[in-house]
Structure formats: structure tokens, C-alpha cells
Image (cartoon, rainbow, N blue to C red):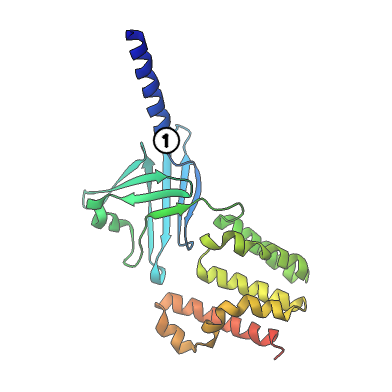
Amino acid sequence: MQWLKLLGAAATLALSTTATLAADPAPGTYINEGGFGVLEISRAADGALGFGIEELGANAHTCSLGGEIRDGKAELATMENESCRLTFRVDKAGVHVEQHADDQEQCRYFCGARAYFGGLYLRPPAGCAPAEVAATRKRFKQLYDQRKHAEAAAQLDSLLPRCERVIMDIDRGWIESDLAITRHKLGDDAGCRAILAGRAELAAMSDEEIVDSYPPVEGELYGRLAGAVRTNLKLCAGR
């Protein structure tokens, strides 16, 4: 009977080890909902699991941090000789990055005043990682400049519904604007107006109202987008 107990103990240990390994985040790119933060997980040649987080907050304030994950946890030193302790928890949607309850102030060391990090970082759908989205938009512009409008529109048609959860709203607005004017070039003004319908409220705001409604950096960005949307709405209305 003793050997059965030993075998059971060995099996339990093996299952525990497997569970620990399975809980480690898989290498890759993860993006939080809204597209403001990117978590990169990488495996070094020596087997160490590294991570990096870049987060964009209001008024272009940022968080930037990285280190090594061991058994689903990381500990980062700050200048105050204290630590920012993190836990990485995996589920079907992606990776939850959680700050230790006692380390909120220490973890602020890695961020600007209006930036925060943590929460759920989603595994993006195929083609939705930042570099992939940028490549698709570059290809769109090449085709558009070549007046291959149908092919250009095809580049963006599936991008937004597939990637909308992990693209920043300002970027989504420019993609909508690009797709709308391409629809106009194809003679589909109704399609153009439908794409821009969600930006009509922004376009109706004055530049002063936009500046007053957003932090300075976002106010400038949304002001530019509003100008493009106004122009495209006029074109698609035949004015």
C-alpha cells in the first residue's frame, strides 16, 4: 500500500507542477479593452519569462514597466527601496495583471499622473495587434493613393468589427473617416454617411467645445478628427 501512496503523491505533485506551468501567461501580445495598454510576454533563451507593459493615459501621460515573471508573480523595485508586486492571472480572455493591495502607491512610480496600468489584457484577434493594424492601414493608404478604392476599402471593412475592442477610439475614428471617404469615392454616399453617423455629435461641436471637453492633448487630436469628419460628411451629402 505504501507504494500506492507514493505514486499518488507523485501524481499530485506532477499535476500541481503542470497547473503552475499552465497558469503562466503564454508569450505574445495582449491589449487592454480600448487599446490604451499593451502587455508583451516573452520567453528568453534561458527560459525566463519576461514582461513589459506600456500604457497611455489621459493627456499623453504614460506607464512603462517590465521585469521577470516567476510563478505568476513579479516584483519590481522602486527608487524608494520599496516594491511594486504584481500577479499575472490567466483566463480564456487573456491575462489579468493585478497590483498587490498594499502596493498601490509604489506601483504609481512607473506611471505619469494621469496614467494607470493593470486589469485584463486581451489576446487580440488575428490581425489586431498594433503592428498588424498599422500594416493594414499602411496597405490601405497605398491602395487608396493608387486609386484602387475597392481594394482599399476591403482592407478596412473587416478591421473595425474584428479589432474594435483593442483599438483606441481616436484611431477608430480615423479608420472610420478613411473608410467613409473611400465609400464616397466608390459612389456609395449612403454607406459613407452610415459609417460617420457615430461621429456626428463630435462633428457638430465647435473647436472651442472640443477643447473644453477633453484634456489638452486629446482636445487637439479630436479637434483634427472632427475637422476631417465635417469635411467628409459634406462630401457624402453632395455639398
State the residue at coordinates (64%, 84%): 233
75 to 5, vertically: above or below: below
**What is the crowding at mark 1: few (fewer than 14 residues within 10 Å), some, or many (at least 20)?**
few
Number of numbered markers: 1
Residue 10 placement (x, y as % from top left): 37, 18
Left or right: 73 in relation to 105: right
Quarter of the figure with residue 90: top left
Residue 22 in sight here: yes
Tell which of 6 and 103 is nearer to you: 6
Residue 164 placement (x, y as % from top left): 55, 63
Tell which of 159 and 131 is nearer to you: 159
Residue 211 placement (x, y as % from top left): 43, 84
Residue bearing mark 1 = 48
Left or right: 3 in relation to 161: left
Residue 167 placement (x, y as % from top left): 53, 63
Tell which of 137 and 25 is nearer to you: 25
Left or right: 140 in relation to 89: right
Q: Give the residue furthest to the front.
A: 1
